[in-house]
Image: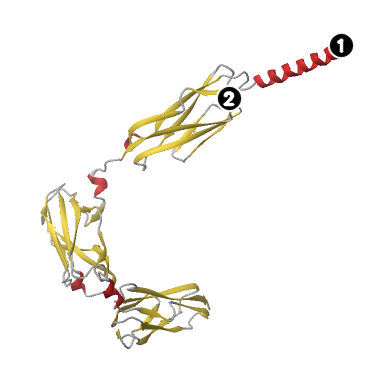
Amino acid sequence: MMKRILISGFACAMLLIGIVDAQSQVARIYFKDSNHDYGVIKEDDGVAYYEFQFSNTGSTPLIIQRVETSCGCTTPDWPKEPIAPGKNGRIKVGYNPSGRPGAFSKTITVYSNAETPTVILQIKGEVIPHVKTPDEIFNISIGGKLYFEKTHIPFSRLFPGKIYTDTLKFMNKSSEVVKVAANAGGLNFLTVRVEPQSIKPKQVGNIIVTYDPQKRNDWGFVMDRFMLSINDSLITNTPISITGSIEEDYSALSASELEKAPRVEFNTTSYDFGQKAEGEPVEYSFTIKNTGKSDLQIRKVKASCGCTTVQPSKNILKPGESTEIKALFRTNGYSGRQSKSITVITNDPKSSTTVLRLSGNVVKK
């Protein structure tokens, strides 16, 4: 009996030793540093590299299976061969700052056969943006001599009764003095001033644009253009454009004024004409009604390309009155799914712009 107990005890001890020995036969990955701060780097300096040093502190070879980064701007490189116990390796990462100004923080995840199979490394820093040269800043040519930052002024919202001003900068990249003038003839709502009117080589000038939406006498989206003359020669192929949306400013209205305001209401804002053969016209009449307490002004009705409208018989609707806006879509030359819009602008302070739509399928002949 005692002999059997001794044999069983010896077998258990050997099994335990085998388990402990198997558990000790593992790879262990140890990084001296798991975080790196680049500090300040310049966008112009290109890819910034750093090497994370590690060692295998285990008893079996360490295999780096893969390394993944949190974004494509970081490129990792790692040893593909097993790292023997007691030996060292490195994971090289490169951060590309191009087009990424400002602070950054990225992670690198290391997958291996180590006892701890996943390790997360981190890099961080701040990128000082590229400082553009004059040639990069002024890159839009007008007349081959003057180069602009931009040739478009987006005024966004324009309120009648207010005056708006913006400035376009340009450079004379020619080797001679250039005489510059603006041609905004016929646009009484637009004032354009060129400073200086004679500009020296490599000198930067200004075109100051002043816009009066009250004189423009329109509503909704507007686009206007003027041209420049260089040395008394009018440049027609590169106009300066100005865009904006002329709207009434309702921000100062009191609660009682809003309560007494007009209200626009449509029978529907969309009409699905189903399926039409090419060449078959689509006609529909939208009903517009004033459900408010003062006169509703229909200020503008504008159709998109391919669609025409008949102006309503009334442009002013008293409370409770209604009228029709007739839409016509000529399907000639169209096929497939179509969507045409009609923009209606009124003096309803809560809904001054309404977009009506005609949509459906046109079958090509």
**At 44% from the left edge and 29% from the top edge, which residue is drawn?**
35
Place of residue 130 in the rendered image (x, y in percent of width and height, measured from the top left): 30, 40
Its colouring scheme is secondary structure
Q: Is residue 80 left or right of residue 243?
A: right
Q: Residues within 10 Å of mark 1 (few under 14, many from 20)?
A: few
Which quarter of the image is occupied by the N terminus? Answer: top right
Q: Is residue 93 visible?
A: yes
Q: Residues within 10 Å of mark 2 (few under 14, many from 20)?
A: few
Of 123 and 304, which appears nearest the observer?
Answer: 123
Of 51 and 5, which appears nearest the observer?
Answer: 5
Of 344 and 89, which appears nearest the observer?
Answer: 344
Q: Secondary structure at mark 2?
A: loop
Q: Secondary structure at mark 1?
A: helix
Q: CA distance from mark 2 to mark 1?
A: 53 Å
Q: Is residue 324 left or right of residue 240?
A: right
Of 363 and 161, which appears nearest the observer?
Answer: 161
Mark with earlier residue (2, 1): 1
Query: What is the number of the mark on residue 2?
Result: 1
From this view, report whether residue 160 is shown above or below residue 94.
below
Eye-nearest disc, 2 or 1:
1
Number of dots carrying numbers: 2
Q: Is residue 145 visible?
A: no
**At 76% from the left edge and 18% from the top edge, which residue is drawn?**
15
Place of residue 2 in the rendered image (x, y in percent of width and height, measured from the top left): 87, 11
- Toward the right, the furthest residue is 1
Which residue corresponds to mark 2? 81
What is the quadrant of residue 357 in the picture? bottom left
Place of residue 54 in the rendered image (x, y in percent of width and height, measured from the top left): 51, 23
Label 1 amino acid? Met
